Image (cartoon, helix red, strand yellow):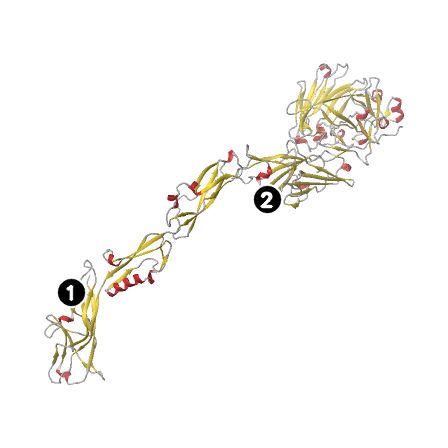
């Protein structure tokens, strides 16, 4: 054999594989075909043919993900077919298929099945259409069945009893039946050629798209010959231990077959063939029964062509794609100004031995944000949470998180297309103008593919996301870049502002709104941080709905709050200090009698600085008036509130209230009855001598308040001889008109009455024959000579 050509370079790829299976006849070849047999039939060992890419599985070829066609069952996948097909459902599993029989009767008609949203190419959704034009063939009843699993069958096991050839597919899961089809009842003796094609188009527009990728066939065995039209040896990829053979026909076509036993039940890398597609919107191929099958079989068989999973090359994880999101939250909502974006990490299926040994996704946000959450979900179905596949995030900083896979070699992780949903909240460094604010639409335009505000590299456009993987000791970094979708939009509603007008003054204790009815008078330099017409200031109001009272004294400051609001409802409170200015106020002190009449002769006025605190209890003028009133027989019935601490807040009046009283103004200090000569007869003294003041009543009550009053007397100590206890019984009398009143100790007796009230000097009318205090000593008591003293207590009772 020729020396095999070994190429080790990175290519783009698609993960579509096909299995061509022949059903073993009752009598047939039960082992691999020999090289001699293959050579005899004109074949050359494919690895020895010039230009073929031969892969060493110990050092696998790496393919990039993003530039290649990626076909995968996903939630949007659906199917359409030409009208010749009918649908059928097999067994209890419920998976449907398109089927057509008697294709010979449809000769010349184009049969087609379109798989809508079959996958992506360079981030765009694509459709794949299978086409076949039957030929008229005698003696056969050929049919075609095309499986149509939905995304529900992605990891759902297909049951053999439901009629599916599960042992002939790369796996038993529904994803292997995606793009799988069966040519049925093929007459193997005739070696007819069955041609078909695959066409690629954009899902959204239907326009053809030229794709690049590695189209896979596996289980190419001794039963059939595959002819990839318009393909050269340079487009072929095989392993260095492959059991594949090739030859060039007289028409210049490349025929490829295998020497592996046709009934070997499972797919193997040694029977896999990769065909590189380079910028094609359609690929054509055919198959026919191999020479061995034609010579050794009889009757009809089925050929199964399913989608397999890659077993030739290693697919690197895709370059992380940043998908910016639009955050329309307003300033009243919890998500307002939060940065939201997604990171798509797309991963093809790899054989166990080709999977990355480690996988770490590092996500950065600008310095004005802190990462709030990173949630990994399934790209195809974001309701599926993939957090269990990852360790807890490593928070390198508030702006940088690392998310590491628990086991990137596991079947659970392999082939997962992951979307990381990222939410970040503004921090103290957030400055909206740093992030591409557009005043015409009111949004921040924050490029998240690369960013110049990452805290580690301010001012340098740096990838936001870095995916680091290792394989066989080699570390690979894949970094995000700017794309058409990597811009995040964040609604920003401008914040209004203004400055308070300085040095505003008002009088004390007034409603400031009466001085400044328009709150706009209190502020100046109105502005909004965005300078956007969307954020025009539309309202200026007082925060308080009621009166705003100024301070009570000079220098008092009242903080008035003015609220300014934009068209988008964003408000800001502006605090405006307003000071009570220096003014004089007059404090008037009035004295009100019991009739409520101001005694103007006693009114006092104090002219002082507004806000002065005055203690009336220490004011000499006030003290003098109060003393004079009290000396004149008046009592103060009410004093001003806070008499000792009155703040003069404006021209104000305080009042003292006083009222007249009726009272005993004076009484004699002594009533001296003189010396009485002892006789055996009764003794009467009617004109004693008074010492001291007269017995007088003072009545200062107003004329409307005056009423009668009575003066009463009671002996509080009878006439008692000095030096012992001898008493002159019933000796003290009071003559009141015609009444001789004996004064006793037991009760006070009325000795004078004035019906209309008023002042009166009672003792001035005392005389020998009239009113007054008298002494009457019985003869029996007179013999007890000596000096006698007694005590009279005078009292006054006012009438109603």
Residue 510 or residue 689, whichever sits in front: 510
Residue 546: x percent and y percent?
Answer: 39, 44
Residue 747 versus residue 46 in the image, above or below: below
Quarter holding the C terminus is bottom left
* Residue 158 seen in the current view: no
Residue 765: x percent and y percent?
Answer: 13, 70
Left or right, 551 with respect to 636, comes to: right
Q: Which image quarter: residue 175?
A: top right
As helix, strand or loop, the secondary structure at mark 2 comes to loop
* Residue 211 seen in the current view: yes
Residues under labels 2 and 1: Cα distance?
94 Å
Residue 650 is tagged as none
Quarter holding the N terminus is top right
Label located before the other in sequence (2 or 1) = 2
Residue 509: x percent and y percent?
Answer: 37, 50
Residue 193 versus residue 308 in the image, above or below: above
Residue 582 or residue 563, whichever sits in front: 582
Left or right, 218 with respect to 780, comes to: right
Q: Mark 1: give few (<14), some (14-19) or many (20+) Cα within 10 Å.
A: some
Residue 590 or residue 69, whichever sits in front: 590
List the residue tagged with mark 2. Answer: 429
Question: Residue at coordinates 58% horizontally, 44% vertically from top-left?
Answer: 427
């Amino acid at each position: 054999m020729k020396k095999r050509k070994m190429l080790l370079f990175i290519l783009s790829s698609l993960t579509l594989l096909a299995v061509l299976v022949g059903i073993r006849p009752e009598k047939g070849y039960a082992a691999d075909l020999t090289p001699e047999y293959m050579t005899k039939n004109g074949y050359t060992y494919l690895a020895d043919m010039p230009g073929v890419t031969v892969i060493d599985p110990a050092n696998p070829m790496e393919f990039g993900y993003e530039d290649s066609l990626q076909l995968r069952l996903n939630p949007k996948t659906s199917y359409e077919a030409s009208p010749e097909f009918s649908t059928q459902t097999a067994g209890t599993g419920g998976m449907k298929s398109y089927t057509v029989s008697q294709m010979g009767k449809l000769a010349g008609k184009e049969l087609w099945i379109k798989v809508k949203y079959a996958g992506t190419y360079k981030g765009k959704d694509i459709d794949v259409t299978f086409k076949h034009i039957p030929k008229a063939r005698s003696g056969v009843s050929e049919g075609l069945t095309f499986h149509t699993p939905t995304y529900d069958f992605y990891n759902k096991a297909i049951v053999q009893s439901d009629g599916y050839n599960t042992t002939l597919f790369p796996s038993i899961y529904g994803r292997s039946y995606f793009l799988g089809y069966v040519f049925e009842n093929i007459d193997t003796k005739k070696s007819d050629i069955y041609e078909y094609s695959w066409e690629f188009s954009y899902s959204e527009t239907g326009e053809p798209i030229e794709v690049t990728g590695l189209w896979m066939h596996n289980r190419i065995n001794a039963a059939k010959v595959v002819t990839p039209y318009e393909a050269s040896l340079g487009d072929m990829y095989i392993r260095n231990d492959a059991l594949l053979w090739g030859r060039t026909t007289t028409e210049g076509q490349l025929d490829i077959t295998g020497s592996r036993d046709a009934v070997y039940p499972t797919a193997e890398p040694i029977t896999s063939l990769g065909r590189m597609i380079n910028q094609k919107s359609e690929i054509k191929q055919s198959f026919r029964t191999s020479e061995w099958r034609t010579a050794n079989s009889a009757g009809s068989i089925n050929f199964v062509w399913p989608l397999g999973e890659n077993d030739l090359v290693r697919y690197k994880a895709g370059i992380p794609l940043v998908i910016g999101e639009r955050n329309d939250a307003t300033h009243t909502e919890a998500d307002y100004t939060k940065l939201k974006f997604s990171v798509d990490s797309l991963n093809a299926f790899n054989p166990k031995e080709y999977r990355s040994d480690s996988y770490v996704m590092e996500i950065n946000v600008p310095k004005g944000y802190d990462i709030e959450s990173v949630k990994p979900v399934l790209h195809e179905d974001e309701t599926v949470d993939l957090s269990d596949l990852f360790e807890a995030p490593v928070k390198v900083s508030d702006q940088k998180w690392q998310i590491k896979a628990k086991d990137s070699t596991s079947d659970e992780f392999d082939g997962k297309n992951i979307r990381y949903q990222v939410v970040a909240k503004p921090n103290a460094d957030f400055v909206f103008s740093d992030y591409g604010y557009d005043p015409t639409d009111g949004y921040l335009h924050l490029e998240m593919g690369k960013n110049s505000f990452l805290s580690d590299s301010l001012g340098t456009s740096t990838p936001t996301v870095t995916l680091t993987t290792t394989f066989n000791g080699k570390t690979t970094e894949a970094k995000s870049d700017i794309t058409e979708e990597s811009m995040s939009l964040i609604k920003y509603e401008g914040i209004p502002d203004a400055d308070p007008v300085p040095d505003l003054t008002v009088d004390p204790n007034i409603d400031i709104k009466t001085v400044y009815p328009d709150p706009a008078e209190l502020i100046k330099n109105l502005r909004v941080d965005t300078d956007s017409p969307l954020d025009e200031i539309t309202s200026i109001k007082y925060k308080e709905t009621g009166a705003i009272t100024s301070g009570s004294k000079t220098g008092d400051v009242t903080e008035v709050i003015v609220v300014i609001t934009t068209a988008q409802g964003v408000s800001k409170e502006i605090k405006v200090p307003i000071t009570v200015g220096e003014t004089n106020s007059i404090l008037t002190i009035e004295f009100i009698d019991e009739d409520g009449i101001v005694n103007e002769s006693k009114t006092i006025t104090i002219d002082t600085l507004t806000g002065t605190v005055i203690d009336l209890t220490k004011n000499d003028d006030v003290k003098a008036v109060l003393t004079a009133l009290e000396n004149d027989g008046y009592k103060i019935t009410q004093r001003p509130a806070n008499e000792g601490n009155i703040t003069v807040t404006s021209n104000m009046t305080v009042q003292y209230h006083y009222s007249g009283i009726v009272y005993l103004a004076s009484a004699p200090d002594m009533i001296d009855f003189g010396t009485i000569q002892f006789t055996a007869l009764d003794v009467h003294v009617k004109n004693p001598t008074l010492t001291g003041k007269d017995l007088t009543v003072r009545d200062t009550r107003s004329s409307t308040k005056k009423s009668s009053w009575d003066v009463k007397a009671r002996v509080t100590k009878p006439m008692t001889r000095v030096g012992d206890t001898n008493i002159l019984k019933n000796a003290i009398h009071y003559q009141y008109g015609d009444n001789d009143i004996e004064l006793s100790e037991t009760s006070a007796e009325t000795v004078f009455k004035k019906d209309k009230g008023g002042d009166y000097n009672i003792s001035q009318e005392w005389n020998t024959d009239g009113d007054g205090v008298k002494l009457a000593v019985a003869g029996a008591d007179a013999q007890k000579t000596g000096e006698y003293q007694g005590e009279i207590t005078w009292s006054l009772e006012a009438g109603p």
